[in-house]
Image (cartoon, rainbow, N blue to C red):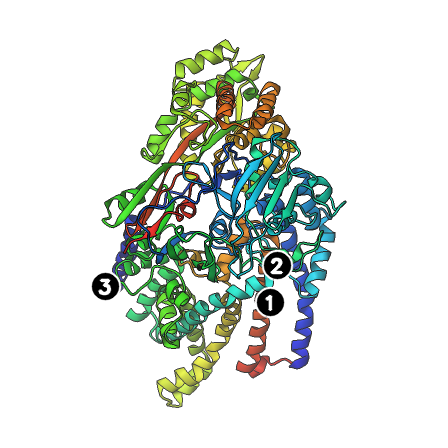
């Protein structure tokens, strides 16, 4: 198992090199000029000075050299400096990423808590009233744009219920003055999380429910389930002991894919709810042509995704001894 | 049957969600998309009258310091270093935490800040400031002339990468210092601890404003800096230390900035609000934040629906003022039919500005035919009434084109010497203003005047590439484009010089319409040397008239800006240049 993991980790290196090179090239194609964007449109900085800044930022080097320089810096742990935040890119990313994580982890937990029982129940009573309701419900959840759903919640709930805030992560003035207790802090952040977590849960719920339902349906049609039933086992035992464990497998793939999403911010959701997460940082990086920041964030996302896949592969082994790799 | 019922219910649910969404207000986008800020650093202001250093005699009645004011803004990135910030939102914090030698009051007159007095030498090249000897930074260190000198050396350093270098580049010895040739910088010298002398290469009226950069404490920012290596300064961005009226106490990026009044601030009777909380808001919900009291102030509002909501609210006051700046259309003066003055004039006459302003801004905007800010001292009511205007007149437009030899030919379009009149118009996708303008152009220029319109959509950054950053290579790619500008200086010089002086034609420069008029160039150069503001007024008015007569560009609208604020904030006066930060000097909270 360890050699398998080691091998896969080594394979990550060329993968990440190719991905980062692609991102680098695409960013170079972005319209606009990083120096001008940094100085601000219409700033009266003389062309000679602009040239000087360009030279200092290494933007005059040919693209391959720029890329190699970037790689060299990254190898030493230096992701560069963000122009928008005037801070180290790594500080910016890690300053915001936990806020995104906070939202996503709760959303995922709630989604799983709801999706698994709902998925199983739908599978067991296929095409029943319950199943049909959730089929329509999931389709609605999947089809509805995040920001649209978020706005509806804001206008319906936050506008009319005093203790549900419109947006933000906490009440600024409370944070400034210092919370009376940890509990007060948790309650304040919790209030602010209510709507964004609801939106995230609803949107991921649909996919998770459908996956659980389908894989359970697949499994309960297998021969060994029929055997279990014919042995006279209780239906509950059949479903939860025999069927569910096997149905977990495809779900684990999905969860593996979900890991990057835990750290990745939802740009629209964070913008609508003014959540200080990594998605909003990426957006302001893009509008501000903050190349170091955008580059690092995108490469980081790619890395998470690749690691997520690896994790899914590894966890297969735990759930199903048959796929355990030698 | 059951199945059908469920489907029906589900359908109803979806429908109701959609209806709920339709009931919400549409978000009329601001023209932020097309924004280009000119002279943001205000480096082209000027005033000849040496105002004496009186510290603004207060009212008879002494007001107490106190209260909390919460301001909603849409961006907080956290770069509060005066030499490196570029977002205007970060600029609020910089202006609140740092001092300058002197400031403008609401009438545009100079008032003393860190300096007690100042004088200009007879030849106009030297400006001397006598600084207050009892002035301290928020960390307790004294503010001296050496801090001023250091701040200007930072702007002139060879490794300086910020945007404010142009404030220092007129100083004597700038080039040599900025190239790293010498350690000497004769342009700004501390004669003693409290006397600082600026020496400029040329005697220009616009030098004066360039002496008013923020004073940065050398002992804090300069600790890790040597000539040629400013990296240590760049890193100090989120913990500003200055001698301004406020100190930054708490800051959470993209969430809030919290400032408390600086105990060491020189003037006890100014900036009477004790706490300022700058809070992130979202455009869709900022009005709710205001009406529920989450924020007390929203500045620079233009949305007609929001304006009506604010007017209807009991506890909300409104300040109303014309925007200092405008949305404009610029035409290419080096390529295509718009190189001809007659064509530009005809386009102007057939551009129904009034209709646009009424339709889009619902009356909350005005039109203007000159290039200056409405707050500029060069602009007087009589003058505005006297200059040429291009009131909508299709017949006149057609007549001008006919006379200029552009007549409708076999192609169905206007032609001259066998060439069809084609205009390449650069527009942006999903831009509310352009979505109103383009159909008007198609109606009046396309169908009305038989001009072949070639309308292309490009992202904002691509347009900037075409007309600014890489403009030399793209001269023949466009005939006209739309952008907007905000002017932050009272002096009219910067506005016209940047946009219309031929030396500013070229990639990365601001004369985007590539307008070249040697006579006007000379007039502008001379005008900058006139030290007396009153003497300069008629010259700038003449420059404005020439540009208008030439139809060098078309200002489209100057929208009316509103500040909405809770009635607990009193004595709060603002205008297009004098923003809420400046207004805090006199404002106070009355609970």
Is residue B7 toward the left or the right of residue A35 in the image?
left
Image height check: is A57 above or below A254?
above
Report if residue A128 is visible in the image. no
Of A191 and B290, which appears nearest the observer? B290
Number of residues whose C-alpha sits closer than 10 Å to that of mark 1, classed few (under 14), some (14–19) or many (20 or more): many
Query: In this rendering, which labeled residue sits more in front, label 2 or label 3?
Result: 2
Q: Earlier in the sequence, mark 2 or mark 3?
A: 3
Query: In this rendering, which labeled residue sits more in front, label 1 or label 2?
Result: 2
Of A8 and B497, which appears nearest the observer? B497
Rendered image: mark on residue B219: 2
Disc 1: which residue: A306
Q: Secondary structure at mark 3?
A: loop
Q: Chain of mark 1?
A: A
Disc 3: which residue: B1
Q: Chain of mark 3?
A: B
Number of residues whose C-alpha sits closer than 10 Å to that of mark 2, classed few (under 14), some (14–19) or many (20 or more): few
């Amino acid at each position: 198992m360890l050699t398998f993991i080691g091998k896969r980790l080594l394979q990550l290196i060329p993968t990440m090199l190719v991905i980062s090179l692609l991102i680098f090239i695409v960013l170079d194609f972005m319209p606009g000029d990083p120096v001008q964007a940094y100085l601000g449109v219409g700033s009266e900085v003389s062309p000679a000075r602009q040239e000087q800044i360009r030279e200092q930022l290494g933007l005059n080097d040919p693209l391959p050299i720029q890329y190699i320089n970037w790689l060299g810096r990254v190898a030493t742990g230096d992701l560069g400096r963000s122009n928008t935040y005037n801070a180290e890119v790594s500080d910016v990313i890690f300053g915001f990423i936990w806020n995104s994580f906070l939202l996503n982890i709760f959303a995922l937990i709630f989604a799983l808590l709801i999706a698994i029982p709902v998925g199983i129940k739908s599978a067991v009573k296929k095409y029943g009233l319950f199943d049909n309701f959730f089929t329509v419900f999931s389709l609605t959840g999947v089809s509805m744009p995040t920001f649209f759903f978020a706005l509806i919640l804001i206008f319906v709930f936050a506008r009319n219920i005093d203790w549900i805030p419109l947006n933000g992560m906490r009440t600024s003035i409370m944070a400034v003055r210092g919370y009376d207790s940890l509990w007060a802090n948790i309650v304040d952040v919790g209030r602010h999380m209510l709507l964004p977590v609801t939106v995230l849960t609803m949107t991921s719920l649909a996919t998770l429910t459908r996956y659980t339902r389908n894989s359970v349906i697949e499994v309960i049609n297998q021969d060994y389930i029929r055997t279990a039933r014919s042995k006279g086992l209780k239906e509950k035992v059949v479903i939860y002991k025999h069927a569910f464990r096997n149905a977990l497998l495809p779900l684990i793939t999905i969860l593996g894919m979900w890991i990057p999403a835990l750290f990745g911010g939802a740009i629209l959701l964070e913008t609508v709810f003014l959540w200080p997460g990594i998605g909003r940082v990426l957006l302001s990086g893009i509008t501000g042509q903050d190349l170091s920041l955008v580059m690092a964030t995108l490469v980081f996302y790619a890395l998470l995704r690749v690691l997520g896949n690896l994790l899914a592969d590894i966890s297969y082994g735990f759930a199903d001894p048959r796929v355990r790799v030698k | 049957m059951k199945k059908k019922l469920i489907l029906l219910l589900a359908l109803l649910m979806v429908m109701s969600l959609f209806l709920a969404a339709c009931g919400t207000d549409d978000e009329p986008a601001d023209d932020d998309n097309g924004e280009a800020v000119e002279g943001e650093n205000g480096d082209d202001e000027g005033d000849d009258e040496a105002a004496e250093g009186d510290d603004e005699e207060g009212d008879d009645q002494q007001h107490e310091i106190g209260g909390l004011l919460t301001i909603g803004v849409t961006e907080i990135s956290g770069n509060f270093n005066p030499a490196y910030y570029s977002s205007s939102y970060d600029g609020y914090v910089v202006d609140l935490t740092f001092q300058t030698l002197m400031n403008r009051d609401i009438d545009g007159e100079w008032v003393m800040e860190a300096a007690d007095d100042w004088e200009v030498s007879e030849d106009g090249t030297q400006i001397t400031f006598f600084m207050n000897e009892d002035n301290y930074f928020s960390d307790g260190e004294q503010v001296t002339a050496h801090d001023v000198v250091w701040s200007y050396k930072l702007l002139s350093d060879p490794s300086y990468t910020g945007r404010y270098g142009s404030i220092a580049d007129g100083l004597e010895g700038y080039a040599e210092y900025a190239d790293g040739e010498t350690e000497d910088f004769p342009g700004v010298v501390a004669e003693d601890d409290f006397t600082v002398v600026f020496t400029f290469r040329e005697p220009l009226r616009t030098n004066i404003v360039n002496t008013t950069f923020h004073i940065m404490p050398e002992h804090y920012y300069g600790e890790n800096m040597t000539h040629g290596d400013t990296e240590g300064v760049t890193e100090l961005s989120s913990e500003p230390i200055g001698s301004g009226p406020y100190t930054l106490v708490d800051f959470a990026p993209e969430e809030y900035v919290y400032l408390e009044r600086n105990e060491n601030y020189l003037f006890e009777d100014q900036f009477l609000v004790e706490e300022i909380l700058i809070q992130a808001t979202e455009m869709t919900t900022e009005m709710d934040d205001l009406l529920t009291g989450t924020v007390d102030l929203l500045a620079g509002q233009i949305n007609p629906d929001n304006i009506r909501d604010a007017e209807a609210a009991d506890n909300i006051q409104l300040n109303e003022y014309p925007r200092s700046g405008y949305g404009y259309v610029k035409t290419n003066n080096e390529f295509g039919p718009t190189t001809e003055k007659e064509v530009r004039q005809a386009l102007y006459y057939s551009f129904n500005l009034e209709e646009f302003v009424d339709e889009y801004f619902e009356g909350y905007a005005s039109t203007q035919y000159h290039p200056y800010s409405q707050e500029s001292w060069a602009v007087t009511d009589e003058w505005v009434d006297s200059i040429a205007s291009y009131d909508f007149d299709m017949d006149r437009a057609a007549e001008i084109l006919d006379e200029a030899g552009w007549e409708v030919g076999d192609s169905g379009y206007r032609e001259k010497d066998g060439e069809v009149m084609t205009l390449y118009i650069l527009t942006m996708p999903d831009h509310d203003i352009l979505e109103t303008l383009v159909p008007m152009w198609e109606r009046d220029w396309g169908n009305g005047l038989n001009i072949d319109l070639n309308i292309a959509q490009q992202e904002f950054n691509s347009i900037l590439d075409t007309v600014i950053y890489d403009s030399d290579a793209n001269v023949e790619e466009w005939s006209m484009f739309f952008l907007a500008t905000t002017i932050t200086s009272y002096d009219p010089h910067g506005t016209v010089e940047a946009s219309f002086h031929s030396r500013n034609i070229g990639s990365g420069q601001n004369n985007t319409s590539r307008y070249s008029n040697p006579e006007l160039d000379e007039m502008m150069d001379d005008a900058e040397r006139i030290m007396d503001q009153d003497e300069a007024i008629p010259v700038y008015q003449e420059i404005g008239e020439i540009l208008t007569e030439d139809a060098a560009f078309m200002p489209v609208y100057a929208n009316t800006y509103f500040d909405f604020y809770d009635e607990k904030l009193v004595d709060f006066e603002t205008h297009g240049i004098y923003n809420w930060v400046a207004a805090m000097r006199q404002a106070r909270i009355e609970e």
